[in-house]
Amino acid sequence: MHVMVFGCGYSGTAIAKAFADNGVRISGTTRSADKMEALRQNGVDAFLFDGETLDDALRRALADVTHLVQSIAPGAGDPLLRLLGEGRVSLPPRLEWIGYLSTVGVYGDHKGAWINEETPCVPVSGRSKERLEAEEGWLAMGRERGVPAAVLRLSGIYGPGRNAFCNLDKGTARRLIKKDQVFNRIRVEDIGAATRFLSDRGLGGIYNVTDDRPGPPQDVIVEAARLMGVEPPPEQAFETAELSPMARSFYGENKRVSNAKLKAAGFEFSFPTYPMSLAQLWRDGRWRG
């Protein structure tokens, strides 16, 4: 078994750790030479990939890959699909499973309603439209090759080193209030576990990888501040807050995302709600990463 994670960043490293059994080779790519050593310390054979060209070492490694995970965000299209389409790279002959990391942003805005994998996608942002195109491309690639291809639609990612505690500690946490706004979240270790679960069972198709408890974003800040024993930041009205265009666009999408399909397949979340997850991070002292 040889797992290759294209774009082995925060989520990709968690996926690599989830596959780290005796005898499993894990490879991963990064755009930054500075990050290669950190990947190696996590047991990952690290390769540079700029999204444009594969060097000889990466081509050799790709040749015997059995499980391919694509975590690189699209930019003017999916970089791997583009290289495959141009014939500049070929899928490995021994490939058994494909995983593509997408986002619940492809659903667009549903005004706070519950949605699932059957809900029509009406993406708002350009980046979500590109994600949807990449999803379709990878699902088609799987059908063409006769290989299960799973699309993992991820909600707001957090975990060790990236969480409300860190933001409170740095003084960057904000308690924005927008009436009836809710978000789902997902702990990064559950992304790794869900990827391994789908891979081990050879499952393809679309799966929402998200927690059980959509809720107002400000409630997460308040809960983290309570656990830390500090005062939460003051409330700010969303309408008058200074936000980057990307941050503001997130608040333009309001939905409650169901994970029932993944659970029905047999997956059990280790961190199904943010209160228990935050409590575990704080108790174990792992919130800093």
Image (cartoon, grey):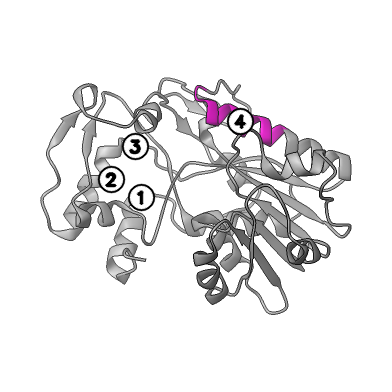
**Helix, strand or loop for disc 1:** helix
The residue that appears at 44% across and 44% down in the rendered structure is 212
Q: Amino acid at mark 1?
A: Tyr
Query: Contact, CB < 8 Å: mark 2 with mark 3?
Result: yes
Crowding at dot 2, Cα within 10 Å, few <14 / some 14-19 / many 20+, comes out as some
Cα separation between marks 2 and 4 = 29 Å
Q: Amino acid at mark 4?
A: Glu
Instruction: Answer with mark 2 or mark 4, whichever residue precedes in sequence.
Output: 4
Cα separation between marks 2 and 1 = 7 Å
The disc at residue 215 is 3
Q: Is residue 158 left or right of residue 36?
A: left
Crowding at dot 4, Cα within 10 Å, few <14 / some 14-19 / many 20+, comes out as many
Query: Contact, CB < 8 Å: mark 4 with mark 3?
Result: no
Instruction: Answer with mark 2 or mark 1, whichever residue precedes in sequence.
Output: 2
Residue 120, how many percent across, how many down?
61, 21
Please say whether residue 135 is one of the residues in the magenta stretch: yes
Instruction: Answer with mark 3 or mark 1, whichever residue precedes in sequence.
Output: 3
**Helix, strand or loop for disc 4:** helix
Query: Contact, CB < 8 Å: mark 2 with mark 1?
Result: yes
Query: Contact, CB < 8 Å: mark 2 with mark 4?
Result: no
Inspect this view and state whether residue 233 appears.
Answer: yes
Crowding at dot 1, Cα within 10 Å, few <14 / some 14-19 / many 20+, comes out as many
**Residue labelled with disc 1:** 274
Cα separation between marks 3 and 1 = 9 Å
The disc at residue 220 is 2
